[in-house]
């Protein structure tokens, strides 16, 4: 019998929904609910699948673990997956934590056009660089670790690129969406070598997760 | 003390004692493996002209190459790949040697990554002016097993298959690149959403993998004639022991480089493919000597 496949799950925003999804797929996720000091948890499956070994990690670390092959599978938001990129497969849209990337600025800002130099604050410099170049905007990108909304208020940046769920935080701070970039949701990512070596097992798990997606959301995969 | 004096440049490192012993043992093992099969060792310079790679369809992107300027102002790179330099050798200094040329090497390549220059040990072989794909693939498997202590899982496909399907779809360069990157990441959901109508053949094809039966399924769903590449794959499969390789039509070749059968090998615990290889019948022609060729490289991470 092979050792269990190891999966890295992103902590935070997606954690609860992700646990619910794996529970619907038959995994006993109780170890994840009260992790205590343990870092690696076994998730037995009562519905015919092999157990998984799970670690909870910050989203960027999920991508690193999977890229480097220390975890065969991972669940992280499309935002982190795109920002970091890397040699892994992205096999399933888990439709969890749906939100979108947007370019936002204080109400009334003229961002496009004009000769001035623009500054954009973001937690996602790679995605922002790519997106702005597609729009033909030449801007300086300022990397921020948290609360991008603050940057225009402080005069650090003219606009921000950030994840927007409801838009409430933006409105409260007098910011408005200038351009919606693309929709985001959690993805199942798979290490290339792990997939090649244990394809049947990973395909079964992927299929089971697909069947376990909340029915109300399954039709909603486009912007 | 200044850091630039007492630290080796980013990505490089010193090797001490046991590591040196291990390297010598590994080289001795490789020497025996290749020489016993009639391959002769070559070694090429650590510096090469940048254009040797950029003008010959190299799959390496320019930002992964470590560049330096020669005294005459030409752009050079630290050897980013072993095949093009060996092809250059075959097209020039080895013109009077009998064919096929059976050459092997064990020398590192250098890659720019995360602001550093990383040395990646590599060993491999090239057969130029002939060569039997099955024999080379088995040698590749043995080389990877020698390096990693486990038989790699090898997947094969044929560059002509995707080439033919993509040509039929008449995509522009950017679209082709995008479609290939989705296939490469097995992002079939996005592929299904984004492909123009009539491209269902491609979608079913790139999900196919398995044994010889996969070839018949591929012929059925491609929607365009791909008999020639399938015939070559069939020939290769029949020359290999049962179960030695898996066919996977989701493998994405560098289409500017590979012209026929190509393969990748995987071992547990490694991030990606540790073995890459295939037939590259165009490269030698671009260097002025039109000869078919097939080769492989195993890299040590």
Image (cartoon, rainbow, N blue to C red):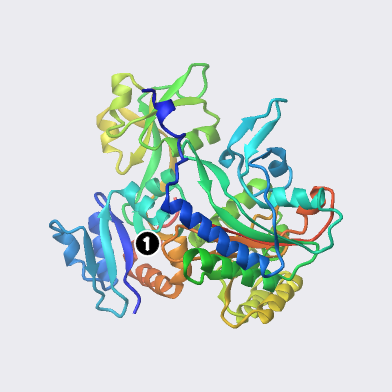
Closer to the camera in the image, B145 or B33: B33
- Identify which residue is drawn at 24% across, 31% down: A172
Residue B193 visible? The answer is no
Residue B278 location, x and y as percent?
67, 63
Residue A168 location, x and y as percent?
26, 37
Residue A204 location, x and y as percent?
40, 74
Closer to the camera in the image, A148 or B284: B284
Closer to the camera in the image, B1 or A9: B1
- Identify which residue is drawn at 62% across, 62% down: B31
The residue that label 1 is drawn on is A73
Tell whether A66 sits left or right of A55: right
Answer above or below: position of B283 versus A145.
below
Place residue B293 in its image quadrant: bottom right
Q: Which quadrant: the N terminus of chain B? A: top left
Residue B68 location, x and y as percent?
62, 31
Tell whether A132 sits left or right of A41: right
Residue B94 visible? The answer is yes
Most distant residue in the top direction: A116
Answer above or below: position of A44 versus A104.
below
Closer to the camera in the image, B105 or B285: B105
Element type where label 1 sits in the image: strand
Answer above or below: position of B154 versus B5.
below
- Chain identifier of the residue bearing label 1 in the image: A
Place residue B276 in its image quadrant: bottom right
Tell whether B91 sits left or right of B185: right
User: What count of labels does the image hold?
Assistant: 1
- Identify which residue is drawn at 75% across, 74% down: B227
Tell whether A90 sits left or right of A75: right
Task: Count residues near mark 1 (Cα–Cα under 10 Å), then give few for <14, some for 14-19, many for 20+.
Answer: many
Place residue A140 in its image quadrant: top left
């Amino acid at each position: 019998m092979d050792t269990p496949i190891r999966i890295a799950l992103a902590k935070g925003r997606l954690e609860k929904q992700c646990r619910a999804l794996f529970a619907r797929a038959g995994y006993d996720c109780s170890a994840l609910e009260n992790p205590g000091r343990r870092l690696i948890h076994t998730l037995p499956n009562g519905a015919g699948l092999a157990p998984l070994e799970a670690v909870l990690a910050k989203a960027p670390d999920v991508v690193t673990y999977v890229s480097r092959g220390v975890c065969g599978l991972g669940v992280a938001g499309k935002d982190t997956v795109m920002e970091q990129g890397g040699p892994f497969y992205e096999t399933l849209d888990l439709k969890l934590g749906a939100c979108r990337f947007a370019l936002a600025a204080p109400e009334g800002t003229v961002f496009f056009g004009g000769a001035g130099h623009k500054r954009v604050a973001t937690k996602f410099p790679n995605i922002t660089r790519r997106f702005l170049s597609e729009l033909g905007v030449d801007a300086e990108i300022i990397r921020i670790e948290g609360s991008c909304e603050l940057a225009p208020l402080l005069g650090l940046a003219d606009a921000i690129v950030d994840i927007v769920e409801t838009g409430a935080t933006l409105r409260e701070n007098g910011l408005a969406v200038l351009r919606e970039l693309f929709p985001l949701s959690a993805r199942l990512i798979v290490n290339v070598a792990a997939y090649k070596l244990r394809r049947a097992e990973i395909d079964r798990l992927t299929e089971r997760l697909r069947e376990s997606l909340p029915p109300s959301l399954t039709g909603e995969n486009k912007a | 003390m200044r850091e630039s004096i007492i630290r080796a440049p980013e990505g490089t490192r010193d090797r001490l004692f046991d590591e040196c012993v291990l390297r010598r043992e590994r080289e001795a093992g490789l020497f025996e493996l290749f020489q016993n099969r009639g391959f002769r060792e070559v070694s090429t310079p650590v510096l090469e002209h940048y254009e040797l790679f950029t003008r010959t369809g190299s799959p390496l992107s320019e930002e992964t190459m470590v560049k330096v300027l020669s005294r005459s102002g030409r752009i050079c790179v630290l050897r980013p790949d072993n095949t093009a330099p060996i092809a250059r050798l075959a097209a020039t200094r080895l013109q009077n040697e009998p064919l096929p040329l059976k050459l092997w090497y064990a020398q590192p390549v250098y890659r720019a990554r995360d602001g550093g220059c990383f040395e990646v040990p590599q060993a491999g072989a090239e057969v130029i002016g002939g060569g039997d794909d099955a024999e080379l693939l088995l040698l590749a498997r043995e080389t990877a097993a020698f390096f990693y202590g486990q038989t790699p899982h090898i997947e094969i496909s044929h560059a002509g298959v995707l080439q033919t399907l993509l040509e039929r779809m008449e995509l522009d360069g950017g679209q082709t690149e995008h479609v290939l990157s989705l296939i490469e990441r097995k992002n079939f959901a996005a592929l299904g959403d984004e492909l123009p109508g009539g491209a269902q053949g491609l979608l079913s094809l790139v999900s196919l993998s398995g044994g010889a039966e996969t070839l018949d399924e591929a012929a059925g769903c491609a929607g365009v004639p791909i008999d020639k590449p399938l015939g070559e794959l069939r020939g290769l499969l029949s020359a290999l022991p049962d179960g030695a390789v898996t066919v996977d039509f989701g493998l994405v070749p560098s289409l500017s480089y590979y012209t026929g059968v190509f393969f990748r090998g995987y071992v547990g615990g490694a991030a990606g493919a540790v073995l890459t290889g295939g037939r590259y019948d165009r490269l030698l022609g671009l260097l002025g000597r039109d000869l078919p060729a097939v080769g492989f490289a195993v890299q040590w991470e």
